Each structure stands twice: as structure tokens, then as C-alpha cells.
Image: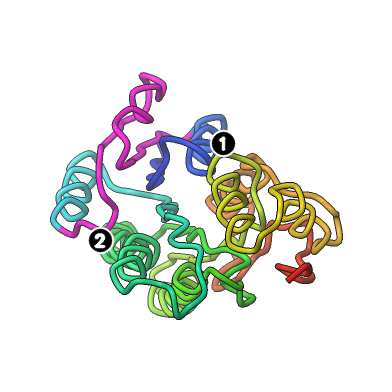
């Protein structure tokens, strides 16, 4: 059976991605730092409680995956929103934690997935970036910096691993309905002296579709990128964002 690993697959986008690959017939393995989120995973999934930025834990995970038969698709999805503040008000510790989870987590996953995929002569890596990896975002400097860097990582990985039959791409979700985005909306509303609905409308009106996206929209793209339907798609930055024109038009 074809195996997929989704980091931060216990809830939100990661959970939707895992369910999408499950429906497509993949053997699903998910990690998450939240043990409670993993507890509700289907019994057919393999689960590991893991901080994606912990190298020793990541290395041990991939040893287990190798012993279990290898890996066909990696979805490097782990991430946190980070602080919402003007750049001069961001604490270095908050910057470092945001970059560690979002960027170093993606780096470690691809670092340890690469040998397994190279030995098999095939594979696909799907990075979760963001529209924040395409545009600057006011009040989100650590997050935007990490998501831009993921795109550079992805393009380099695609070049290095392409000769071994391995593809790499990055999905850039826009504003995604769900608890994490609600937290972002609340923090931005407080920082800007606006209501939650005003901030929400600002995000939505900055897209051609005038709407947020759903986790399922992102999952559909991830499954496409992980299957043979996209066999010649590599090194690409793909927005699933309703065509973001301006990430913060009301500022």
C-alpha cells in the first residue's frame, strides 16, 4: 500500500489532508504535538505524538517509517501562527519559536524523508506554505518570513531530488476557515482596534472569490500533488486562496 505521512495531521488542514489521502487509498501516518487531537484519529491510521521541530524525535520517526516499508508522500504541514504584532514589538523568543516550527519543521521532515524516497526511486513532498509566503503581511513578520523561506526550501529540494524521481511542491492556502484563523482574526482585531468581522471582511474582500477557503480545498490539492495525476508537476508554488489580490486591504 502507498504510504503518506502528514505532520500536524491531528486537526485542521492536516486532518483534512489525512482524510483525503485515506479516501484515496493511502496508508496514512500522522504526527501531531497534541496527543488529544491524535486520540480521535481512525484506528486504521498510524499516529505519533511529535514536535515537528525536535530533530531527535523526527529522526526516530523516520527510522520507524523506514522499518515499516518506506514513504511515498510527505506532507510537511506543521506550523503555528506565531505572534501578531508590529515588527518592533516582536520578541526574539516568539520569532524563534515561529520560525522553528514552520521552517525547521519542514526542513527536518524533508531531510529525513529524502533518503527513504531516494532509495525507492520515487516520491512526492508537499510543503504547506501560505499566501504569506507570496505577499508581506502586516503584523505577521515571523510567520511571513518562515512561509517565504519554505518556498525557497521547496524549490531547492525539487532540484536536488528530481533526478531521483521525487517531486516537491508548495501549497499556499489563503485564509482558511477554522479555529486557527479565528485566533488570528481576534489578535489582529485587537492590534488594529477593529472588530473581528471587519478583519474577516478585509481578508475576504482581498480575494477574487470574496471568500475564505476550507481545509478540504487545501486537502484536495495535496492529494492531487501526491498522486500520479501530477507526475510532471514539481517545483511549483500553488495558491489555494480564491486568488488573493491584497492580503490586508483595510490596513
Q: Which residue is mark 2?
A: 112
Is residue 27 in the magenta section? yes
- Determine whether the residue tagged by mark 2 lies in a helix, strand or loop: helix
Residue 91, horizontal then vertical, whole percent: 34, 71
The answer to which image quadrant residue 65 occupies is top left
How many numbered discs sit on the rendered protein?
A: 2
- Magenta range: 26-55
Tell me if mark 1 has few (under 14), some (14-19) or many (20+) residues whose alpha carbon lies within 10 angstroms of its own.
Answer: many
In the picture shown, does residue 77 fall above or below 39?
below
Lower position in the chain sequence, tag 2 or tag 1: 1
**Contact, mark 2 vs mark 1 (Cβ under 8 Å):** no
Q: Which mark is residue 20?
A: 1
Residue 53 horizontal side relative to residue 236, left or right: left
Residue 127 horizontal side relative to residue 188, left or right: left
Kindly identify the residue that appears in the image at 44 percent across and 71 percent down.
142
Residue 184 horizontal side relative to residue 160, left or right: right
The answer to which image quadrant residue 208 occupies is bottom right
Nearer to me, 79 or 171: 79
Q: Where is the N terminus found, in terms of image quarters?
A: top left
Q: Which mark is residue 71?
A: none
Is residue 137 in the magenta section? no
Tell me if mark 2 has few (under 14), some (14-19) or many (20+) residues whose alpha carbon lies within 10 angstroms of its own.
Answer: some
Residue 239, horizontal then vertical, whole percent: 68, 63
- Determine whether the residue tagged by mark 1 lies in a helix, strand or loop: helix
Amino acid at each position: 500500500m502507498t504510504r503518506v505521512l502528514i505532520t500536524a495531521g491531528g486537526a485542521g488542514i492536516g486532518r483534512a489532508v489525512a482524510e483525503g489521502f485515506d479516501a484515496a487509498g493511502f496508508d496514512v501516518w500522522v504526527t501531531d504535538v497534541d496527543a488529544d487531537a491524535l486520540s480521535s484519529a481512525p484506528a486504521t491510521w498510524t499516529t505519533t505524538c511529535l514536535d515537528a521541530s525536535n530533530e531527535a524525535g523526527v529522526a526516530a520517526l523516520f527510522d520507524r517509517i523506514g522499518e515499516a516499508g518506506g514513504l511515498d508522500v510527505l506532507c510537511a504541514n506543521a506550523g503555528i501562527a506565531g505572534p501578531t504584532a508590529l515588527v518592533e514589538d516582536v520578541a526574539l523568543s516568539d520569532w524563534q519559536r515561529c520560525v522553528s516550527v514552520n521552517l525547521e519543521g519542514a526542513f527536518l521532515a524533508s531531510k529525513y524523508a529524502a533518503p527513504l524516497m531516494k532509495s525507492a526511486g520515487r516520491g512526492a513532498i508537499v510543503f504547506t506554505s501560505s499566501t504569506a509566503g507570496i505577499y508581506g503581511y502586516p503584523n505577521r513578520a515571523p510567520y511571513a518570513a518562515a512561509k517565504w523561506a519554505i518556498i525557497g526550501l521547496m524549490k531547492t529540494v525539487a532540484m536536488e531530488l528530481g533526478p531521483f524521481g521525487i517531486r516537491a511542491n508548495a501549497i499556499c492556502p489563503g485564509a482558511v476557515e477554522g479555529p486557527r484563523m479565528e485566533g488570528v482574526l481576534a489578535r489582529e482585531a485587537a492590534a488594529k482596534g477593529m472588530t473581528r468581522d471587519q478583519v474577516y471582511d478585509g481578508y475576504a474582500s482581498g480575494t477574487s472569490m470574496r471568500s475564505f477557503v476550507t481545509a478540504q480545498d487545501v486537502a484536495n490539492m495535496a492529494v492531487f500533488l501526491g498522486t500520479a495525476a501530477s507526475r510532471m508537476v514539481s517545483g511549483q508554488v500553488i495558491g489555494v486562496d480564491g486568488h488573493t489580490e491584497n492580503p490586508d486591504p483595510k490596513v
